[in-house]
């Protein structure tokens, strides 16, 4: 005959085992994988024909480094025309001189008009000429401003045809070569490997023991080996009900890119605190 208290005893024992496993996490070791901190697909902001690709697979690049260029002779010519228009000073000075002359002429003729030595039609014509001269001067100033904006726009187009690396990283893959047309494609794929991400899947029993900011020891697989300290950056708060697990991401500093990404590793929690 089975007593109801047996089931309660077994449930209590199982609960105690789970708690024991959770408190013993310092001695626990889990499988993980070392991945790039981020992957960036580099393309072009404007369509065009690729003129140069300055890096290849396996090359390390710095943030801001030129990695490719597009053919831009027409765009550069447009930029230079806008620059020339922007720097035109002779037309502005001529219109300004004409405006000042019209103002002086009006002043002289007003004195004569006040002395009844000049008909109204003459001073009216002079006033109209002055107004037109001022409007022409404002027009050339507006044209100069438009030329400045056009030069800025053209410069931006030319700059966008020079493609620079957005990160410090390594070229993982090159998709296109000089002479090919680019519109919606990517020229290359870059990976940032300093720092590295370490992804680990843990049983839900350890959830309360894993804290963001805590440290762990990462041991890459052979032939790399060694022990490295990583910091917990992300603890998933949505469990996988089917497997009873949750994900954890650690950040592993990788100065001088000494460690490659894509490695399997062992992660020991508690040992790096």
Image: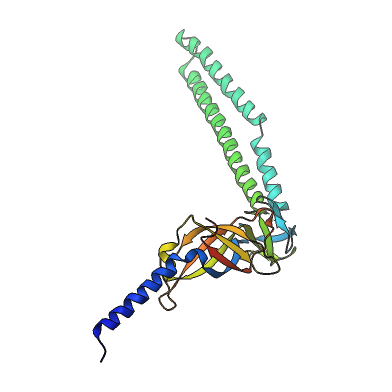
> Is residue 238 found left or right of 126 in the rendered image?
left
Location of residue 77 with respect to 31 vertically, above or below: above
- Looking at this view, is 135 or 257 the one in front? 257
Where residue 160 sits in the image (x, y, percent)?
64, 52
Q: Residue furthest bottom?
A: 1
Location of residue 154 with respect to 238 vertically, above or below: above
Q: Residue furthest front?
A: 1
- Residue pictured at 57% horizontal, 37% vertical: 145
- Looking at this view, is 10 or 29 the one in front? 10
> Is residue 61 found left or right of 105 in the rendered image?
right
Using the rendered view, name the quadrant where residue 52 is placed.
bottom right
Location of residue 98 with respect to 153 vertically, above or below: above
Where residue 33 sits in the image (x, y, percent)?
59, 68
Using the rendered view, name the quadrant where residue 260 is placed.
bottom right
Where residue 159 sits in the image (x, y, percent)?
65, 49
Q: How many marks?
A: 0
- Looking at this view, is 257 or 97 the one in front? 257
The answer to whether residue 16 shows anywhere in this view is yes
> Which corner quadrant holds the N terminus?
bottom left
Where residue 224 sits in the image (x, y, percent)?
69, 65
């Amino acid at each position: 005959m089975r007593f109801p208290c047996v089931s309660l005893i077994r449930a209590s024992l199982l609960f105690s085992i789970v708690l024991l496993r959770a408190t013993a996490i310092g001695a626990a070791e889990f499988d993980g994988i070392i991945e790039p901190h981020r992957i960036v697909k580099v393309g072009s902001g404007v369509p065009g024909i690729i003129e140069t690709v300055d890096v290849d697979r396996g090359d390390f690049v710095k943030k801001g480094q030129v990695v490719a260029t597009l053919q831009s002779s027409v765009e550069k010519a447009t930029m230079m025309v806008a620059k020339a228009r922007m720097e035109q000073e002779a037309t502005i000075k001529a219109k300004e001189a004409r405006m000042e002359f019209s103002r002086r002429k009006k002043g002289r003729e007003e004195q004569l008009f006040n002395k009844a030595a000049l008909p109204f039609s003459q001073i009216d014509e002079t006033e109209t000429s002055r107004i037109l001269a001022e409007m022409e001067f404002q027009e050339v100033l507006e044209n100069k401003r438009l030329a400045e904006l056009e030069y800025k726009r053209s410069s931006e187009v030319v700059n966008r045809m020079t493609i620079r690396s957005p990160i410090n990283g390594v070229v993982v893959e090159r998709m296109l070569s000089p002479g090919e047309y680019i519109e919606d494609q990517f020229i290359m794929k870059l990976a940032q490997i300093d720092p590295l991400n370490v992804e680990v899947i843990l049983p839900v029993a350890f959830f309360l023991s894993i804290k963001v900011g805590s440290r762990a020891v990462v041991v890459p697989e052979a032939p790399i080996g060694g022990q490295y300290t990583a910091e917990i950056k992300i603890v998933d708060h949505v469990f996988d009900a089917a497997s009873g697990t949750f994900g954890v991401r650690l950040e592993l500093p990788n100065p001088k890119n000494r460690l490659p990404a894509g490695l399997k590793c062992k992660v020991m929690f508690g040992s790096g605190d």
